[in-house]
Image: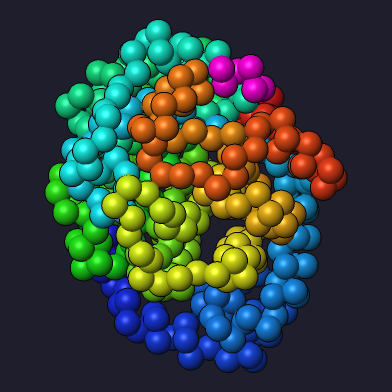
């Protein structure tokens, strides 16, 4: 059994219609419940909830503080390679883009580690394009133990792998894997994933199940907001989370909500999400699930990140470079997408403290469980 079975019972148009038909009384009912379900989530992300944003924000704030205290985990992405055998319409690394390609060797990774450690980070997210043959298990076997030696918490955002491969990487030090479905609308997915293994919608959808079965500590899911109608896509993320938590209760989960950003061969979003709507979504996820970690990247602007920080977010990236070798070499020609918050790690740390929060340089959970 996997989420694919559950997914096949859901109907995109019915869900969409159900979200858009929610009323103010559905929203009020959801706000007043001590424990909320997926129907309540639909109400909270619906247009009917927009006038209730202040109340949602207050509830989200207090639920988050109750579970996570006044802490903010900080992590940094470490791009190992921009080689990719897929063609995704929204990404600078797409195989069809004529850009300089680079995969870091051991010395180059070591230079990146030094630069990252100098900024105080103890939690890294390894990122690659998806190139099974050149940046596959052989490469990961060589790099993961070497990087893990230097950091407390190691997450990965690479091509989906098999269960046995995840189990092996766990023995080498892998703690968490982020695997975003991009969109849960199969035909729209097909329009944006034109070549390569990523065209296999179901294999990707099945990945969090394989990760949980392999015993990976934390799994990150999400949709790329803008590819499809955002409310319905984000409902699918919530349904996916609900299924995973019920099926694999021992695993931790995090959600990200990247919005489409300009990149080489830029794609215009089909569904535009405003800043206010992103706040609404963050609060709705928190109201649905007080335990889930909510992560915000440097794709968002400094002012947005500063303002939204207390409302439900539990971890943030900082000082990110989205190209391999970005911390030690800084060759912008290689980057995946432009980041919006370009502040240094130290100034993001200062901002977090100024807001009355404690920056935590490790994964939130590992920092408090020893
Ligand atoms: S989104 Fe991922 S798989 Fe698609 S082109 Fe970019 S790096 Fe490759």
Please state the quadrant of the image where ligand 1 appears: top left
Please identify the residue farthest to the left as the structure is shown. Answer: 195
Looking at the image, residue 166 lies above or below residue 291: above
Q: Residue 305's x, y, as percent?
A: 66, 52
**From the viewer's perspective, is 160 left or right of 341?**
left
Magenta highlight: main SS: helix
Q: Is residue 82 magenta?
A: no
Q: Residue at x 42, y 15 (%)?
A: 109
Check the picture and name the quadrant holding the C terminus: top right
Question: Which of the two residues, 289 or 256, is positioned nearer the viewer here?
Answer: 256
Instruction: Please report the residue visible at 20 percent of the width from the left and 63 percent of the height from the top.
Output: 191
Q: Is residue 88 above or below residue 278?
A: above
Which residues lie in the magenta part?
115-120
Horizontal side, residue 29 vs residue 353: left or right: left
Residue at x 84%, y 43% (from the top left corner): 354
Q: Nearer the viewer, residue 144 or 74?
A: 74
Residue 25 visible in the current orientation: yes
Residue 48 vertical placement versus 356 (above, below): below
Q: In the picture provided, is 239 more to the left or to the right than 300?
A: left
């Amino acid at each position: 059994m996997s989420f694919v079975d559950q997914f096949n019972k859901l109907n995109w148009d019915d869900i969409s219609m159900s979200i858009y038909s929610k009323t103010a009384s559905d929203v009020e009912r959801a706000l007043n419940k001590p424990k909320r379900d997926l129907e309540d989530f639909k109400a909270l992300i619906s247009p009917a909830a927009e006038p209730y944003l202040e109340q949602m924000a207050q509830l989200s704030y207090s639920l988050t503080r109750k579970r996570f205290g006044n802490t903010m985990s900080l992590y940094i992405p470490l791009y190992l390679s921009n080689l990719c055998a897929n063609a995704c319409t929204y990404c600078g690394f797409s195989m069809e883009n004529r850009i300089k390609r680079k995969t870091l060797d051991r010395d180059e990774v070591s230079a990146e580690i030094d630069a990252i450690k100098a900024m105080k980070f103890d939690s890294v997210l390894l990122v690659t394009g998806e190139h099974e043959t050149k940046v596959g298990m052989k490469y990961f076997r060589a790099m993961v133990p070497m990087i893990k030696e230097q950091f407390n918490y190691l997450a990965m955002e690479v091509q989906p792998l098999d269960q046995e491969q995840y189990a092996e990487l766990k023995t080498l030090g892998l703690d968490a894997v982020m695997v975003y479905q991009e969109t849960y609308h199969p035909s729209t997915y097909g329009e944006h994933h034109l070549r390569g293994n990523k065209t296999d919608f179901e294999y990707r959808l099945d990945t969090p199940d394989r990760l949980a079965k392999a015993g990976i500590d934390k799994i990150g899911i999400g949709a790329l907001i803008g590819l499809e109608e955002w409310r319905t896509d984000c409902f699918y993320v919530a349904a996916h989370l609900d299924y995973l938590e019920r099926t694999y209760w021992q695993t931790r989960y995090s959600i990200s909500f990247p919005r489409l950003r300009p990149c080489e061969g830029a794609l215009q979003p089909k569904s535009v999400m405003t800043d206010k709507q992103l706040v609404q979504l963050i609060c709705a996820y928190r109201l649905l699930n007080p335990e889930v970690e909510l992560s915000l990247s440097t794709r968002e602007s400094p002012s947005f990140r500063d303002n939204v920080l207390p409302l439900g977010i539990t971890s943030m990236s900082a000082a990110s470079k989205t190209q391999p070798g970005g911390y030690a070499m800084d060759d912008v020609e290689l980057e995946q997408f432009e980041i919006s918050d370009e502040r240094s790690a130290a100034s993001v740390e200062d901002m977090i403290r100024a807001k009355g929060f404690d920056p935590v340089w490790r994964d939130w959970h590992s920092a408090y469980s020893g």
